[in-house]
Image (tube, rainbow, N blue to C red):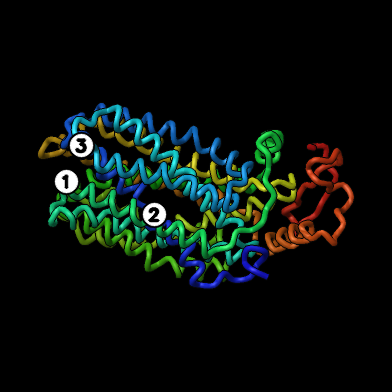
């Protein structure tokens, strides 16, 4: 049995090649939003208002296209496979978008930024979503899924570190955004992305799963809404994502005006992400000894306790903030990997309930929630500090009261949302034992030698559908009128 077909362990070299595209794809997230707005607003002279409006419009487009791409990715089998084919199809859009945005021609304006941001978001969604769905389908094993997703996310963190550092190195150590630094980053992504994608597509098998037509997916949306673990998980993820989005949005302002050391923003970010890489294996081990949801809840609790003191730091408190960066960065691997691995388990319930393969749709909704939480964080943080009189152009940041509000929004406001997320996942119903029962039932139904149990016919039949009881350690079928 291969990992693609059951619960066997994927060989380490195949796992590494599978995660490798996360390295260049990471540059499409945080680094893109660190460098691109400043370059187009200042260097190209478009202004912050225009650039902010354009990028907001592109982000709305990105959120809207997520579920569309998810449905199509489940419904259409491209040459190379359902997941590998869509990753390859997203390549030209992603490469063209990143190249045109990071090496803009003379006279590039708002229209250039909007069009190529839309192209980049479309390609990035096709590639990232397909790889996430592919990861969920590579194994039916509870702990193996954690291992697959953790390795991918480690490559994403490595890519984030490299993408933050590369423009600075290319600019001769200049931390300002330069045309040479941006073009170097764009060229590196354009070269690495096809190579790493080809390595993953060629080396890693894809499970032979049936396509799920779009009409069938939309007809069974009720089963998705009724999926209690999915609702609980995505609620926790949105709460935690909002809590993470607040400090991510305000990090540069906080370091510059509250700590008073803008020159240390880059090194502190590096320490944060490096801690995430080093601690990732520890979270994987803890999840294997306990469970994914318990390990994630512990990580969020540590992050909450470590982050709250940031609300009370002031000028020159570099060492305490460095400790906070290390402690919260160490929980990053859990935040990135464990919820995604839990999502793969949640999809098993949908497979039994509907008989459909809808990993693309599930991860599309996951992506929508991720982007919505980040947008909500931005939409909350900036108005709050603006109302308090914070002025980033002023030497004193607008005064002591404004800096106090900035510190509280950065360090204290995320805490209740983290606690909410912890409460949601603390009693997450999908344990290792229950998921094992789900996997066995799914494997049994996939076997052509095994007859379908009464009342659990294929989704095309008129028989009552399967429903799952997650209160017992094994999957069970019962009569339902939901079909």
Which of the two discs, 2 and 1, sits closer to the camera? Answer: 2
Q: Which residue is mark 2?
A: 193
Quarter assignment of residue 434: bottom right
- The answer to which of marks 3 and 1 sits earlier in the sequence is 1
Residue 350 image offset from top left, x and y in percent: 69, 47
For residue 425, side relative to residue 5 (left or right)? left
> Residue at point 30% right, 48% down?
31
Q: CA distance from mark 2 to mark 1?
A: 23 Å
Pointer 2: residues within 10 angstroms few (<14), some, or many (20+)?
many
Quadrant (top left/top right/bottom left/bottom right) for the C terminus: top right
Q: Which mark is residue 401?
A: 3
Residue 162 in view in this figure: yes
**Residue 48's image quarter?**
top left
The spot of residue 144 in percent (x, y) is: 58, 66
Can I make out residue 302 in this image? no
Above or below 195: residue 350 = above
Cβ–Cβ under 8 Å for marks 2 and 3: no
Depth check, front residue: 239 or 61: 61
Eye-nearest disc, 3 or 1:
1
Q: Which of the two labelled residues, at mark 2 and mark 1, occupies the earlier sequence position?
A: 1
Which quadrant would the N terminus be assigned to in this image?
bottom right
Identity of the residue drawn at 23% across and 31% down? 108
Q: Nearer the viewer, residue 122 or 410?
A: 122
Q: Is residue 430 left or right of residue 147?
A: right
Q: Quote the CA–CA distance across marks 2 and 3.
A: 46 Å
Q: Is residue 247 left or right of residue 220?
A: left
Q: Position of residue 172 (x, y in %)?
A: 12, 56
Residue plotted at (79% across, 37% down)? 482
**Residue position marked by numbered label 1 in the rendering:** 178
């Amino acid at each position: 049995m291969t990992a693609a077909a059951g619960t066997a362990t994927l060989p380490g070299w195949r796992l590494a090649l599978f995660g490798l595209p996360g390295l260049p794809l990471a540059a499409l997230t945080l680094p893109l939003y660190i460098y691109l707005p400043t370059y187009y607003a200042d260097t190209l002279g478009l202004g912050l208002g225009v650039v902010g409006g354009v990028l907001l419009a592109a982000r709305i487009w990105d959120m809207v296209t997520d579920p569309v791409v998810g449905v199509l990715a489940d419904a259409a089998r491209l040459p190379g496979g359902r997941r590998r084919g869509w990753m390859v199809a997203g390549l030209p859009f992603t490469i063209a978008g990143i190249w045109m945005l990071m090496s803009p021609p003379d006279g590039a304006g708002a229209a250039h930024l909007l069009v190529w941001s839309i192209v980049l978001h479309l390609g990035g969604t096709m590639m990232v979503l397909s790889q996430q769905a592919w990861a969920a389908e590579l194994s039916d094993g509870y702990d193996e899924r954690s291992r697959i997703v953790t390795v991918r996310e480690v490559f994403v963190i490595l890519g984030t570190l490299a993408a933050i550092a590369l423009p600075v190195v290319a600019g001769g150590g200049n931390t300002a955004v330069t045309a040479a630094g941006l073009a170097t980053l764009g060229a590196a992504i354009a070269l690495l992305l096809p190579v790493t994608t080809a390595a993953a597509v060629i080396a890693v098998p894809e499970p032979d799963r049936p396509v799920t037509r779009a009409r069938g997916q939309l007809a069974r949306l009720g089963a998705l809404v009724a999926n209690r673990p999915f609702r609980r998980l995505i609620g926790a993820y949105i709460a935690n994502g909002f809590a993470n989005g607040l400090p991510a949005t305000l990090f540069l302002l906080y370091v510059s005006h509250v700590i008073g050391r803008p020159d240390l923003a880059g090194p502190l970010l590096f320490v944060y992400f490096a801690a995430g890489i080093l601690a990732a294996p520890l979270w994987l081990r803890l999840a294997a000894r306990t469970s994914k949801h318990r390990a994630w809840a512990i990580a969020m609790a540590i992050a909450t306790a470590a982050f709250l003191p940031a609300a009370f730091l002031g000028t020159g408190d570099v060492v305490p903030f460095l400790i906070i960066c290390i402690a919260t960065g160490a929980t990053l691997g859990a935040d990135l990997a464990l919820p995604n691995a839990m999502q793969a388990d949640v999809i098993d319930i949908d497979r039994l309930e509907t008989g459909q393969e809808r990993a693309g749709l599930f991860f599309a909704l996951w992506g929508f929630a991720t982007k919505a939480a980040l947008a909500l964080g931005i939409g909350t943080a900036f108005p709050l500090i603006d109302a308090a009189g914070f002025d980033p152009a002023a030497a004193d940041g607008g005064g002591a009261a404004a800096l106090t509000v900035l510190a509280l929004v950065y360090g204290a406001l995320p805490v209740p949302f983290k606690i909410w997320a912890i409460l949601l996942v603390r009693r997450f119903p999908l344990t290792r034992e229950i998921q094992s029962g789900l996997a066995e039932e799914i494997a049994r139904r996939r076997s052509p030698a095994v007859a379908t149990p009464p009342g659990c016919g294929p989704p095309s039949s008129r028989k009552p559908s399967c429903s799952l009881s997650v209160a017992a350690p094994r999957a069970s079928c019962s009569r339902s009128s939901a079909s």
